[in-house]
């Protein structure tokens, strides 16, 4: 059977190859976007999980929009206005897919910062959207480019990760947030604000969601993968009811609904007395790992490499001099450290900034220090002392 044209354009996922090499014995992996499995809040979930056999009603078919008590909780938790509602999804990744299916026709313009989240590139690529990149700067997207793009290309969607971007870790400033929201309103572009790392801030105060400045021109995607566990596959998309309703129709066709027992367990977790402490412990742990990685990189990286300081999230982005970033990542694996080369975060044919994405949430501080030594040896060998 011949592959659909939409799939023929999708490149095989290099990241999958890296991740499989990264699990080889002796390799320290800074490649995945994995939370620390030892810190999953399983003890907080235990009572709820053990109660499931006595809650048979949860195992019946349920509503596509989600488990009603969880939807009620989201309304209060996210302070949604009466005009807005939630749709529970099988991870926030599914929300992206539903949005593309509901709102994107082939050749429609979708704007993203470059580099971009690989999963979003894949979803909008499969939808055969015309993906337009705007450059990302230290405080968010280049606003001049963004406005020009909105004015001239009339995109349907601006997809963005304003809190601790994947892959760069960039967090938009307040003023950029306000300006982007104003542009979305002015040019009637829907902002798809994807915030899986928002609650992983370990330094400074949270900034308002960009969508809080343009609530009627936005959809917000939240994930429970990083603050609970990825395996429960739960995320949520919120927005105006009239924008969410078409997503419910598409989800009905896709999988009827996400697991109701898991939604009930998630609700019990989010309302558990110990959940806030779990979150602050996680932030403190990731902060300590980030600080070790940043300190080691500052001390040991050659002068021609640079990296951004981050206040949260999971990633550090190390820029390199002109080089073959794939070859460098391969050489790193050969030296028992796995990282992701920047090219995978760009569309094919796009100008790539040579760089590496380093994850700091899944390795111990001892491993992080060894990983830096191994990485620096490879960079020095490939790019010079
Ligand atoms: C920016 C971004 N969006 C969405 C996702 C998907 O998250 P989920 O596990 O909720 O599907 C990820 C996962 O790493 C991500 O980095």
Image (spheres, helix red, strand yellow):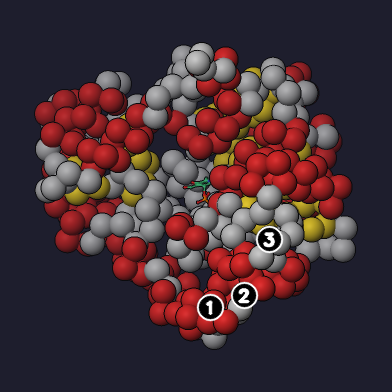
Residue carrying label 3: 61
Q: Classify mark 3: residues with Cα within 10 Å, few (<14), some (14-19) or many (20+).
A: few
- Tell which circle, 3 or 2, labels the residue nearer the N-terminal end: 2
Residue at the bottom extreme of this rendering: 273
Q: x, y (%) of residue 131?
A: 61, 23
In the rendering, which numbered label is found on residue 93? Answer: none
Splitting the image into 4 quarters, where does residue 365 fall? bottom left
Q: How far apart are marks 1 and 3 (CA)?
A: 16 Å
Say what secondary structure mark 3 lies in: loop
Q: Classify mark 2: residues with Cα within 10 Å, few (<14), some (14-19) or many (20+).
A: few
Q: x, y (%) of residue 106?
A: 69, 19
Residue at 36% x, 69% y is 39
Q: Distance between the residues labelled 3 and 2?
A: 11 Å
Splitting the image into 4 quarters, where does residue 17 fall? top left
Q: In this view, does 103 lie to the left or right of 344?
A: right
- Tell which circle, 1 or 3, labels the residue nearer the N-terminal end: 1
Q: Classify mark 1: residues with Cα within 10 Å, few (<14), some (14-19) or many (20+).
A: few
Say what secondary structure mark 1 lies in: helix
Residue at 34% x, 46% y is 32
Residue carrying label 1: 53
* Label pair 2/1, CB-CB below 8 angstroms: yes
For the C terminus, give its image quadrant: top left
Q: Nearer the viewer, residue 239 or 265?
A: 265
* Label pair 3/2, CB-CB below 8 angstroms: no
Splitting the image into 4 quarters, where does residue 86 fall? bottom right
Q: Is residue 383 left or right of residue 287?
A: left
Residue at 47% x, 26% y is 346
Q: x, y (%) of residue 38?
A: 31, 68
In the rendering, which numbered label is found on residue 56? Answer: 2
Q: Nearer the viewer, residue 255 or 177?
A: 255
Say what secondary structure mark 2 lies in: helix
Q: Is residue 208 left or right of residue 285?
A: right
């Amino acid at each position: 059977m011949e592959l659909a044209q939409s799939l023929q354009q999708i490149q095989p996922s290099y990241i999958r190859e890296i991740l499989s090499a990264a699990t080889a014995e002796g390799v320290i992996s800074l490649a995945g976007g994995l939370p620390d499995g030892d810190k999953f809040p399983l003890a907080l979930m235990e009572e709820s999980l053990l109660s499931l056999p006595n809650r048979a009603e949860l195992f019946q078919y349920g509503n596509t929009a989600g488990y009603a008590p969880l939807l009620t909780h989201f309304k209060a938790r996210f302070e949604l206005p009466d005009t807005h509602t939630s749709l529970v999804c099988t991870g926030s990744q599914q929300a992206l897919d539903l949005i593309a299916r509901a709102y994107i026709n082939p050749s429609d313009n979708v704007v993203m910062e470059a580099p971009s989240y690989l999963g979003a590139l894949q979803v909008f690529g499969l939808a055969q959207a015309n993906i337009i990149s705007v450059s990302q700067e230290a405080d968010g997207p280049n606003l001049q480019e963004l406005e020009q793009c909105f004015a001239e290309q009339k995109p349907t969607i601006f997809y963005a990760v304003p809190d601790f971007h994947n892959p760069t870790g960039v967090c938009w400033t307040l003023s950029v947030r306000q300006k982007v929201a104003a542009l979305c309103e002015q040019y009637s572009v829907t902002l798809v604000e994807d915030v899986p790392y928002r609650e992983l801030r370990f330094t400074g105060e949270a900034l308002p969601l960009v969508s809080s400045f343009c609530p009627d021109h936005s959809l917000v995607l939240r994930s429970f993968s990083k603050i609970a566990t990825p395996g429960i596959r739960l995320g949520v998309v919120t927005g105006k009811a009239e924008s969410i309703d078409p997503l419910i129709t598409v989800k009905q066709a896709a999988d009827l609904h996400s697991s109701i027992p898991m939604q009930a367990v998630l609700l019990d977790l989010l309302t558990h007395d110990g959940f806030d402490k779990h979150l602050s412990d996680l932030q403190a742990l990731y902060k300590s790992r980030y600080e070790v990685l940043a300190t080691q990189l500052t001390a040991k990286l050659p002068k021609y490499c640079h990296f951004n300081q981050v206040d949260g999230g999971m990633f550090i982005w190390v820029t390199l001099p002109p080089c073959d970033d794939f070859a460098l990542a391969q050489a790193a694996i050969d030296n028992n450290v796995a990282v992701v080369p920047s090219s995978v975060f760009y569309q094919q044919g796009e100008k790539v900034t040579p760089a590496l994405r380093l994850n700091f949430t899944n390795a111990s501080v001892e491993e992080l220090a060894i990983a830096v030594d191994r990485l620096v040896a490879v960079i020095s060998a490939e790019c010079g002392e």
